[in-house]
Image (cartoon, helix red, strand yellow):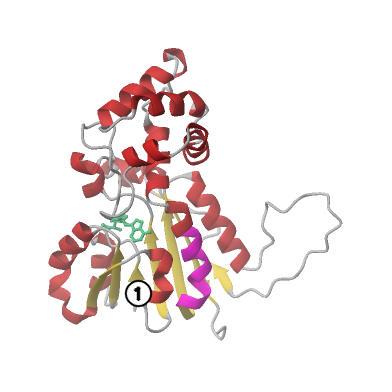
Amino acid sequence: MIVDGTLGGGGHSEALLEAGASVLGVDRDPRALAAARERLARFGPRFTAVQGEFGAVAHLIDAPVDGLLLDLGVSSPQFDEPSRGFSFQADGPLDMRMSDEGQTAAELIASLEESELAQVIFEYGEERFSRQIARALKFAQPQTTKEAVKAIEAAVPRRAWPDKIHVATRTFQALRIKVNEELGQLDDALTAIPQVLKPGGVAAIISFHSLEDRKVKQAFKALCGDVPDDLPRGLPMIPVKVEAQFTALTKKPIVASDEEVSANPRARSAKLRAIKKVEGVK
Ligand SMILES: C[S@@+](CC[C@H](N)C(=O)[O-])C[C@H]1O[C@@H](n2cnc3c(N)ncnc32)[C@H](O)[C@@H]1O
């Protein structure tokens, strides 16, 4: 049994089912679940799907599984539907919730203090104009994506707009990560991996930005018994030999080929890392 913790449109699950696996699909978005159930009905009882969060994967399974797959972030159907509010390119309500629960991005902007909002934009968007943007958003109280874009454009001096991405890209990423608590979900899933996998089981995670990839890289390194690179340097520390429970299947992350990127430009920033639980480890 393989858990596809980010079922989405069911593309990965379909490939796994076609290869003969049984799959439990998990998604927090009820619309994704409905579409994937329809697409994958032909596989009968080999495919089951539940609404839930992959951060709680340990509670969604009855016993350890052979694989856990996470393809992080937003799906194309979510991103391309203006009424979901993820895209700065189309006008829609400033929502950004993957499930239909919790605070929308508009409500988040209204409820946070300006300094807290600036911190979110700085930390999750790595945006250097975070303070100016937070001030503009608090003032504008945008209810739609276009209103938010207008406020962001006005907050960043024209000469400082980035060349390769839209000036609102980083802020939209930050709001989306916060609304969906994406990094907390990832932390919880990474912590659960040893408990969720059988000996010989594989965890594979595809990430789309450096905040996610850094977490995956460090957690996988630790599980493989490598000393993490972010330990303070210069301290009189004796490295502890960690008992490795896992081996790395990807020494370097796997990235999409040029051919794949031209067929699917969203694959451009994808990085796949995978580890395997050592046989004989409980
Ligand atoms: C990039 S898409 C996955 C696409 C999928 N691999 C496919 O082949 O169609 C990510 C999906 O994961 C879901 N998702 C994101 N974070 C989640 C979480 N913490 N728990 C459950 N589902 C989540 C989103 O709702 C979205 O449908």
Of residue 7 and residue 203, the one placed in the foreground of this image is: 7
Q: Specify whether 272 is left or right of 78.
A: right
Q: Position of residue 259 (x, y in %)?
A: 31, 44
Report the number of discs: 1
Q: Position of residue 224 (x, y in %)?
A: 61, 68
What residue is at 57 percent from the left and 70 percent from the top? 247
Of residue 160 and residue 163, the one placed in the foreground of this image is: 160
Of residue 121 and residue 104, the one placed in the foreground of this image is: 104
Q: Which residues are magenta?
A: 186-196
Question: Is any atom of residue 164 visible in this view?
Answer: no
Q: Specify whether 169 is left or right of 188.
A: left
Q: Where the C terminus falls, by quadrant?
A: bottom right
Of residue 44 and residue 254, the one placed in the foreground of this image is: 44
Q: Position of residue 70 (x, y in %)?
A: 39, 61
Q: Secondary structure at mark 1?
A: strand
What amino acid is found at the position of numbered circle 1 in the picture?
Ile
**Ligand 1's quadrant:** bottom left
Question: Is any atom of residue 220 visible in this view?
Answer: yes
What residue is at 23 percent from the left and 79 percent from the top? 46
Using a 10 Å C-alpha cutoff, classify the residue at mark 1 as few (fewer than 14 neighbours), some (14 to 19) or many (20 or more). many
What residue is at 33 percent from the left and 41 percent from the top? 107
Q: Specify whether 119 is left or right of 57.
A: right
What residue is at 49 percent from the left and 64 percent from the top? 188
Residue 35 in which image quadrant = bottom left
Residue 143 in which image quadrant = top left
Q: Label the magenta part by its dominant secondary structure.
A: helix
Question: Which residue has dot 1 on it?
Answer: 2
